Image (spheres, helix red, strand yellow):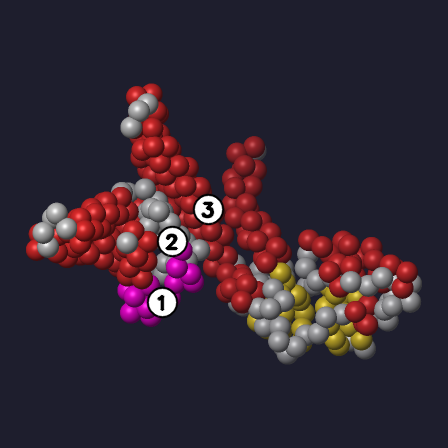
Amino acid sequence: GAIMSLIIHELAHDAVARRRGMHLRAIILSSFGALTDDAYRPENPANEVRVAAAGPAASGILAIVLGACSWIVPGSTFAGEAFRTLALINTSLAILTLLPAYPLDGGRILRAFLWYVSGDLILATRAVGLYGRAIGFGIVLAGLLMLALNGTWSVAAVWLLFAYWSISQAAREGFTRTLIREGGRQVTADEAGLTASRRIAADRTIDAALDEILQSTTSGPLLVQRDGDVIGLVSLAEIQRIPRATWDVVTVGEIASSLDDIPRVGQDTSLVDILDLVDASTGHVALLVVGGRIVGAVTRQLIYERIREHLRAPRDDHMRRNSR
């Protein structure tokens, strides 16, 4: 019954999201009904409110229906007790998830309001996260007080402390995802310098090219070219599948991975859009194309690094100005 209540709560989020033309990447059950940014990525404040409010609304309606059933069915029966218990569970779920602590549904509604007022999702997420920590601090104090009382309060105390830890972790991860995605929306592949991947000749042996390949581990796979045309990609992963004794005779072109089925994007594509393509692709890589020619290859690691550089730039500029 409790698990089914959680499922209905999450399905309500999904139903409203789909009705608004969106979709949840995954339905993630938690004992706190939190809708993570990994499951749902908000597009605007209005949709954020609609999707976030759907879960508590469904739990509230279910609590009313089950409560009415408990009045109709004799309380001394098993069915009556079951209806009463499930009504209490759904009432608690609706109230708990409406607490203004991000990423609980109430916290997401508060974030949507701050986002609407400020026009800045990152600022809104940071603010609601700080507010949520204050609420979490109160939860910790309550948990510690219950532990001090011992007895029947011990289980509730442990649950409250676990709740604070879980919500804090989810809030921290949610803010990081929001920061990465919003930062990625603001910069294109060309602006991030992703259209100039290093190249290596197809006829070079693994031994001869090893140093260059090792240096590319943080800058994405190398483009393997023959007669000026890119014919494949090579990275440390391809080398590790080849016996060490043959590195002096096997060429880079022979081990290069195929370009088939790899998604291709233009230089004006935002990093967050490229990141979505990379995550969805089989090889977790995307090719950058300019004027019909392949000029770069990017991985999730490289995109994250470029987004972090973009986010650090304003802070570094501010520090340089203050040091003058």
Give the mark nearer the N terminus: 1 vs 2.
1
- Where residue 26 sits, quadrant-wise, is bottom left
Residue 16: percent from left, percent from top: 28, 64
The count of marks equals 3
Report the side of 183 relative to 145 (left or right): right
Question: Is residue 21 magenta-colored?
Answer: yes
Task: Tell me the residue at 78%/62% (across/down).
Answer: 241
- Mark toward the viewer: 3 or 2: 2
Tell me where the magenta segment starts and ends, as one range: 14-28
Is residue 136 visible from the viewing direction of this image?
no
C-alpha span from label 1 to label 2: 19 Å
Report the side of 210 relative to 16 (left or right): right
Residue 176: percent from left, percent from top: 47, 47
Three-letter code, disc 3? Glu
Q: Which image quarter is the N terminus in?
A: bottom left
* Residue situated in front as seen by the camera: 302 or 238: 238
Give the mark nearer the N terminus: 3 vs 1.
1
Residue topped by disc 1 = 22
Residue found at the far front of this picture = 77
Three-letter code, disc 2? Leu
Q: Which image quarter is the C terminus in?
A: top right
* Residue situated in front as seen by the camera: 290 or 54: 54
Task: Tell me the residue at 81%/77% (across/down).
Answer: 227
| Disc marking residue 173 | 3
